[in-house]
Image (spheres, rainbow, N blue to C red):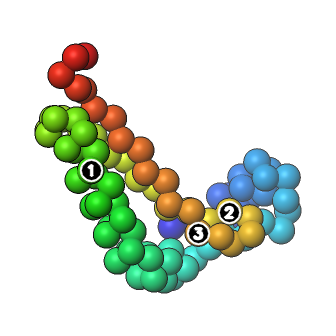
Amino acid sequence: MVTTPAFHCFLASVTADPNVTVPSSKTYIDILDNHFERFTQDASELFLEEFKELDETPFMTMEHDLWTNSSKNSIVGVSGSFFDRQW
């Protein structure tokens, strides 16, 4: 986690909020601990369903990210890309 004064200054300038706070590493760990089990279960079910829809094509790339918005809500982003048989 980047917590340097320069990074805080950067965030303050891009958010136009001089009081912007950078969540701590512990905050992210707590978020992951609280949501990891449910997220992995939901993601596994979704990926299994999509895998079957793709005629079990094994060429899939997954990307994920976790962050909080200005209201301190946890946000998890996941995207996937793949080649199907008709590509």
Measured as percent of width and height from the top left, residue 35 is found at 44, 76
Measured as percent of width and height from the top left, residue 83 is found at 24, 26
Q: Quadrant of the rendered structure where residue 41 is?
A: bottom left
What amino acid is labelled 2 in the image? Asn
Q: In the image, what residue occupies the spot 62% across and 65% down?
A: 68
What amino acid is labelled 1 in the image? Glu
Distance between mark 2 and mark 1 Cα atoms: 30 Å
In contact (CB < 8 Å): disc 3 and disc 1: no
Badge 2 is on which residue? 69
Measured as percent of width and height from the top left, residue 29 is found at 45, 79
> Observer-nearest residue: 62 or 45?
45
Badge 1 is on which residue? 49
Task: Please state if 10 lies on the left or on the right of 58 as rendered.
Answer: right
Q: Secondary structure at mark 3?
A: strand
Distance between mark 3 and mark 1 Cα atoms: 25 Å
Badge 3 is on which residue? 74
- The disc label shown at residue 86, or none: none
> Observer-nearest residue: 53 or 6?
53
Task: Please state if 42 lies on the left or on the right of 82 as rendered.
Answer: right
Q: In the image, what residue occupies the spot 85% across and 52% down?
A: 16
| N-terminal-most mark, 2 or 1 | 1
